[in-house]
């Protein structure tokens, strides 16, 4: 059931709501961005509850990490096929974000999680990922390259 009133917003930036303004012009990538933002909001909601367990936090964070791996790989493949001139930088940003996420995941596993750090990192990353990293290369994300015909 839905709560009657909105929970207190967590510190850090709110996870942006997806809208057509955030579209990169590629349905599959948009769908993955929408799911990532939803998972981000799930995580924030969970952290606002009284006593989220590490198992719960780990579960949502793991979903984010898994989808990010798939998503980054698809984006990189498309950027490469379309000859994006900033592919190397884009890959480096992806890699660094994935490393941060993986570290957070292992912090949760080892009971070393700082919730404030988690909130800050997730909200910053979700915001930057689409606004600052993907939208500027929108022109190179538009179509999924066709795989070469099977030999
Ligand atoms: Fe993306
Ligand atoms: Fe990206």
Image (cartoon, grey):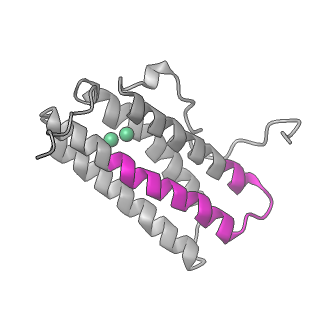
Decide whether the magenta segment is chiefly helix, strand or loop: helix
At horizontal 19% and vertical 39% (from top left) the residue drawn is 147
Residue 113: % across, % down = 58, 70
At horizontal 63% and vertical 52% (from top left) the residue drawn is 43
**Viewer-proximal residue, 54 or 143?**
143
Residue farthest along the top direction in this orientation: 20
Q: Is residue 147 magenta?
A: no
Q: In the image, is residue 3 above or below residue 112? A: above
Residue farthest along the right direction in this orientation: 4
Residue 7: % across, % down = 78, 42
Q: Which residues are the magenta region?
A: 44-72
**Viewer-proximal residue, 64 or 119?**
64
Inspect this view and state whether residue 44 appears.
yes
**Viewer-proximal residue, 33 or 119?**
33
Q: Is residue 54 magenta?
A: yes
Rendered-image quarter of ligand 2: top left
Residue 11: % across, % down = 63, 47
Left or right of residue 14, residue 24 in this image:
left
Left or right of residue 75, residue 17 in this image:
right
Residue farthest along the bottom direction in this orientation: 110
At horizontal 59% and vertical 38% (from top left) the residue drawn is 14
Inspect this view and state whether residue 115 appears.
no
The tally of labels here is 0
Residue 32: % across, % down = 45, 39
Q: In the image, is residue 112 above or below residue 10? A: below
Left or right of residue 89, residue 37 in this image:
right
Q: In the image, is residue 30 above or below residue 25? A: below
Q: Quadrant of the N terminus?
A: top right
At horizontal 69% and vertical 56% (from top left) the residue drawn is 47
């Amino acid at each position: 059931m839905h709560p009657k009133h909105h929970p207190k917003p967590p510190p850090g930036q709110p996870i942006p709501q997806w809208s057509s303004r955030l579209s990169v012009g590629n349905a599959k990538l948009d769908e993955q961005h929408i799911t990532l933002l939803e998972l981000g909001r799930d995580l924030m909601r969970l952290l606002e509850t009284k006593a989220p367990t590490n198992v719960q936090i780990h579960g949502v964070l793991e979903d984010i990490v898994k989808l990010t791996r798939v998503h980054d790989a698809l984006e990189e493949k498309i950027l490469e096929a379309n000859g994006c001139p900033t592919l190397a930088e884009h890959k480096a940003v992806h890699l660094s974000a994935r490393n941060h996420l993986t570290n957070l995941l292992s912090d949760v596993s080892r009971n070393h999680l700082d919730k404030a750090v988690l909130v800050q990192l997730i909200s910053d990353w979700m915001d930057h990922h689409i606004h600052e990293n993907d939208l500027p290369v929108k022109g190179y994300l538009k179509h999924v390259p066709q795989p070469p015909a099977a030999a």
